[in-house]
Amino acid sequence: MAEAGLFAAYAAIGTMAVAPIYFGSFSSLDRLKSTHKKKRDHDEFTEFSDSEDEEDETEAVSTEDAYMFPVYGSIALLSMYLVFKYLNTDWVNYLLSAYFAVLGVAALAQVGVRIVKGTTGIKLPLYHVHLVHKHKTMLHLRFSNLHLAMLGVSMVLTGLYLFSKNWVISNLLGLAFSFSAITLIRLDSFKSGMIMLAGLFAYDIFWVFGTEVMVSVAKNFDAPIKVVFPKDVFPADGKLQFTMLGLGDIVVPGIFLALALRFDRHQYLAKLGYDKEKALPKALNGKHRGFGFPVPYFTSCMGAYVAGLATTISVMHVFKAAQPALLYLSPACILAIVGTAVMRGEIKQVFAYTEESKTEEEENKVKPIKAAPTHRYNLRNQPGAQATPASAGELADDEQEVASVAKVLEETVDPIANVSDSESKKPKAKRAAKKTKAKK
């Protein structure tokens, strides 16, 4: 009976590891861009919460970042070890719990919104909070009633976790963290991904087998940074014992698998002749996302991840000792991509593939406005230009144009004024004076 419960726990851990990787990878696929866009009355404010143009802000991991991953990880791990060793463990965990509670509320709410929208297809109007200063967007929040409802649910669940430390809610928070990280953190190339996996492979070996640091921090760190499942759901003595897997063993390979999936889609679109500056290929049937495509690299890498995880669990079960999962997962994922590329004759394409990532400033950057055609009046007043008297017809055209522009300026209301009410009256008075002068 005990063995059956233990194997059930292993199966549950494996399922909780694969689920966020699979769904997070597909969630990381961007909406395709094309010259075809839906007409909207307001480009800035989308009406519904399922707007196809709405994209999450992502964080790119470059080659330089990948080299530094083990260094930053080692500094953080050693710092936590020293903190737990020389400070009161309970107070440290209170602070960490508060920090992860804030993150957990946001992560659970976002995942809840995605699940409800994905299963029901519900469309709800969006509320907008738009903070602008001198025509520059400082803050733009978009949310619906569904976001507010999920925010309330996530706050209740997080509150229950803080008071009870319930392992089920802890798993929900951990899965939400993993899904969000895999969706939002993006490797810019397979080279960066392989450097990151190789570096963390060495990191795991050193800190697990070479020192007591990793094990000590894992025992003292009381936060939802792992997924757990009881070895026996109904123990005779009433005390639950858990088998566990760290979130790092899910997220790190997960963002590598998400890159493999995006590469699969890139290869498929390249065969269709997709160009973001042109209309979508007919084979996509007008779909900007949600269309099917072959996934050889994602499939092989997912299979390697499952095999590596099974090997980790098997070794742990046989030797009755904790194992660094990346010791098996890192080489498995790397070899799966390289092996698939060699078999398909696409090794050059794999290592040449890169993903462009735009920063928020670049995305919000205002495009330069093209200079308007020079008016004949301006030509006559250019320095060094030969003055020519205007004809009666030109004067009449100028008078009519000035009147039309003044009328438009008076009737147009800027939704986000850059000046106060008292200041806005002055330009209006000046326009009225110019209009009177023009008529004379």
Image (cartoon, rainbow, N blue to C red):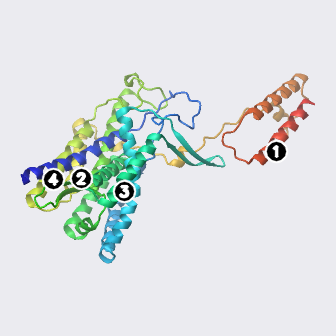
Cα separation between marks 4 and 2: 32 Å
Q: Amino acid at mark 4?
A: Val
Q: Is residue 409 above or below residue 75?
A: above
Q: Decide: marks 4, 1 in contact (CB < 8 A)?
A: no
Taking the image as shown, residue 117 lies to the left or right of residue 236, namely right
Sequence-first tag of 2 and 1: 2
Q: Nearer the viewer, mark 2 or mark 3?
A: 3
Sequence-first tag of 4 and 2: 4
- Asked if residue 399 can be seen in this view, the reply is yes
User: In terms of depth relative to the viewer, which is nearer, 421 or 200?
Assistant: 421
Q: Decide: marks 2, 3 in contact (CB < 8 A)?
A: no
Residue 426 numbered tag: 1
Taking the image as shown, residue 243 lies to the left or right of residue 404, namely left
User: In terms of depth relative to the viewer, which is nearer, 138 or 164?
Assistant: 164
Residue 330 numbered tag: 2
Cα separation between marks 2 and 3: 36 Å
Quadrant housing residue 299: top left
Residue annotated with mark 4? 233
Sequence-first tag of 4 and 1: 4
Q: Amino acid at mark 2?
A: Ser
Cα separation between marks 3 and 1: 54 Å
Sequence-first tag of 3 and 4: 3
Residue annotated with mark 3? 159
How packed mark 3 is, by other alpha carbons closer than 10 Å (few <14, some 14-19, many 20 or more), is: some
Sequence-first tag of 3 and 1: 3
